[in-house]
Image (cartoon, helix red, strand yellow):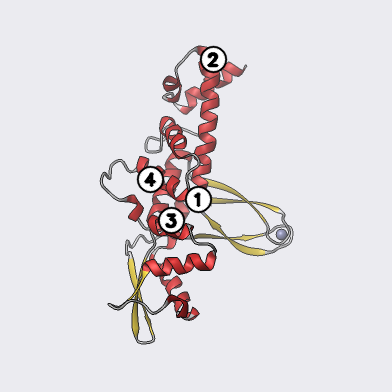
Amino acid sequence: MMQGRPLGLSAETLVEIWEQGAGWHPIDQALLVLRYACVDLPGEDLSEWSIGRRDRRLLEIRRQTFGDRIEGYVECPACRHGLEFELSCDALLAQDPSQARVTGSVEYEGRGWEVRVPNSRDLSAVAEAGDLAAARDTLFERCVRCGAEPAPVLGRWPESLRSRLDVELVALDPLAEILIGLTCQACSHAWQTLFDIATYLWSEIRARSRRLLQEIDLLARTYGWTEQEILRMSERRRGLYVQMALS
Ligand SMILES: [Zn+2]
């Protein structure tokens, strides 16, 4: 299953990332993973990457580290029946045109509204908002400008303008919000669910780190090797020793 992929995160790095980021907010955990994966971009402020750009890179890291196929599980919101689904990192990456435009504009009632794609700093600000509506307001406040003048009082923005700004944001940064269409096999209810690569990847890093530590515990007790020696083995070799130690 898991083969040593040269470009993915190594076993040592996975454990290091998990140890540092355990208990952090998911936005910061995603930035931590990026920092480890983007050592070739020193000085780059990763928190200023758009969320789509961040997620594109996280999908690449996921594919290189754990493989292309993502298996998910959700419950049908109508009948609670469990549903498994599969995604491909490659297929998700192919949906993204990577235009690398970070701003767009919307004409509304004779005025030009400039909108910038949100980044991790914006998400952190939004995370402190009380509810969904407040979060959306915070995001617009940070990311929308109306010409040279400040935008009119946010509470008075018509819903039609807000939805046009939403549409423009999705067009600018399609990977920022990965929606997947699902149909329940039990009751035929169809709905869309949000797939968040950042939290998904973190749960995999956590699970893999725990398994690695269990393997280290077993192999160190059986063979007397050090943690570093065990972590630096290929997945295949370590797996075989684990089998032998257990038999
Ligand atoms: Zn159902």
Distance CA(mark 2)–CA(mark 3): 43 Å
| Residue matched to label 2 | 221
- Residue type at the position of mark 2: Arg
Q: Residues within 10 Å of mark 3 (few under 14, many from 20)?
A: some
- Residue type at the position of mark 1: Ser
Q: Residue at x 52, y 27 (%)?
A: 213
- At mark 2, the secondary structure is helix
The residue at label 2 has a CB less than 8 Å from ligand 1: no
- At mark 4, the secondary structure is helix
Compare residues 46 and 244 and report the one nearer the observer. Answer: 46
| Residue matched to label 1 | 88
Q: Which mark is residue 26?
A: none
| Residue matched to label 4 | 34
Q: Residue at x 41, y 35 (%)?
A: 5
- At mark 3, the secondary structure is helix
Q: Residues within 10 Å of mark 4 (few under 14, many from 20)?
A: some
The numbered mark, 3 or 4, whose residue comes first in the sequence reads: 4
Distance CA(mark 1)–CA(mark 2): 38 Å
| Residue matched to label 3 | 124
Distance CA(mark 4)–CA(mark 1): 20 Å
The numbered mark, 2 or 3, whose residue comes first in the sequence reads: 3
- At mark 1, the secondary structure is strand
Q: Residue at x 26, y 44 (%)?
A: 42
Ligand 1 located in image quadrant: bottom right
